Image (cartoon, coloured by chain):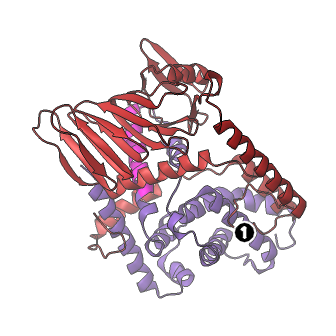
Chain colours: A purple, B red
Amino acid sequence: MRSRHPEALGLLFDRYFDSLYSFVRRLVGRRELAEDVTQDVFYRAYRSIESIDPTRDPGAWLVTIAVNACRDHWRRSDTRAGRHSRPLEEFEAASRLASDGPDPEESLRLRRRHEELEAALAALPESLRLPILLRDFAGFDHADIAGILETTPDAARKRYSRGLAALAALLTEDRP
Amino acid sequence: MTDPTREPPALPEWREKELANELHELPGTPADPEFRERLRRNFVSGAVGAPRHGQGGHRRPTTGWLRGLGLAAAAVALLAIGLSLLRPRTEAEAPRWSTHASGAQASRIRIGDRVLTLPADTREFAAALDAGIAFTIEDTLTLDLVLGRLMSVQVTPGTSVRLPARSPGTQSLAGDLLAGEIRVSTGPDFAGRTLSFHATGAEVLVRGTTFAVIRGADSTCVCVYEGRVDIHPDSGAAAPLDAGLRWIHADGAPEARTEPITPMEAMKLQMFRDAAIERTRPAGPR
């Protein structure tokens, strides 16, 4: 890997691209931005591949790069207002993957629930969304999240809990 | 209305776990296959470069002369648009309905006794839309239907609706929501026209806005995201409904009630509106 052997790079890409893109997409919202940031992640990864720790999960390394790339993007851009928007057809495409079950009513219910969750996630401010994405989508523990967010594990845990509480409040409020 | 930046009460641990489990089960968002393949090829070969930020991963680096060419092309396009505005639209030029967001998965559309399957019957479906024929989405697919630069309509699963027929020169467009839920966003060419949707209990009249009409089992709801609509109840006086508000009328109730729209509906309408704007934007270099 460190010698940038094409086969090793291909394996790394195939193993992590999909989950990384989903993570970035949920973080930045719009497809174009997600593509920019994902390209930036693999650009940075290629350039600094010597620094990869062979004893650690490369996925965590890539996610850390992704968070930094997103932060750089936010610092650079003036698109904060548009960050939460996301074309609905993408939700549709994503939730369709999970709705191939035999029961159409259950598929419909699940699909709508997924749309609600995605929309509520997108509505959260980044400060609350990021710990949720790191914990529940990237699979980090609170100590790792603390390292990425440059805070203490206890503070990371609290931010995650606050994020979930805000998410639950948004979901509850939407019910008739 | 909840402000997500305000501190909500903490959840009990069991609820946190329950919510986290639901999040774990959310399916991933697939990337555009072309983007994925191109990035993979560049990454593996060492040709991956830093993105041109803010322009989307699809766009390729543009050289100076290409930019100049792009500007010239834009000028020609603007001139063409300007000239086209000077003469009335003919039948052939009137915008047609097109289907978006159906993806590759088949979807069943019922029109009377017939069932069309998308994407195979897309042309036939579009022709039915142009003719103003009512239809029902029979499965779990959400469809975005676009009438040129006039309007986008999102039709949710299970909805029965008749959309405005394709009609050159008509200033008044009308549709009917028979059951279910639609979102509507007017486009840049809508100016000067009116659009009305009738659902049980009321007619919604708009002159340019983004809104939703929801016909539930025993009530009709209109949610306005931006702009303003005029509600004409079947009984009672017409009243305007401004952005950020929803109007709910339960069948048989003497009066409707008006209240702020929920953050979730606002978010859905915002996402739908953003996608509609993106679709009507002139295509850039790819």
Magenta stretch?
Answer: A102-119
Q: Which residue lies furthest to the top in this view?
A: B113
- In this image, B4 relative to A40: left or right? left
Tell me which secondary structure the magenta stretch mostly adopts. Answer: helix
Residue A77 is one of the magenta-drawn residues: no
Q: What is the three-letter code of the residue carrying label 1?
A: Asp
Of A65 and B208, the residue lying toward us: B208
Q: Which residue lies furthest to the front in this view?
A: B86
Going 81% across and 78% down the picture, which residue do you hit? A50
Residue B153 at x, y percent in the picture = 47, 38
- In this image, B93 relative to B72: left or right? left
Q: What element carries label 1?
A: helix
**How busy is the neighbourhood of tag 1: few (under 14 within 10 Å), some, or many (20 plus)?**
many
Residue A112 is one of the magenta-drawn residues: yes
Q: Residue furthest right?
A: B65
User: Would you place residue B59 above or below residue B83 in this image?
Assistant: below
Residue B200 at x, y percent in the picture = 25, 30
Of B85 and B168, the residue lying toward us: B85
Q: Quadrant of residue A155?
A: bottom left
Going 32% across and 56% down the picture, which residue do you hit? B244
Could you tell me if residue B12 is visible in this image?
yes
User: Would you place residue A52 above or below residue A108 in this image?
Assistant: below
**Mark 1 lies on residue:** A40
Chain containing the residue with disc 1: A
Q: In which quarter of the image is residue B84?
A: top right
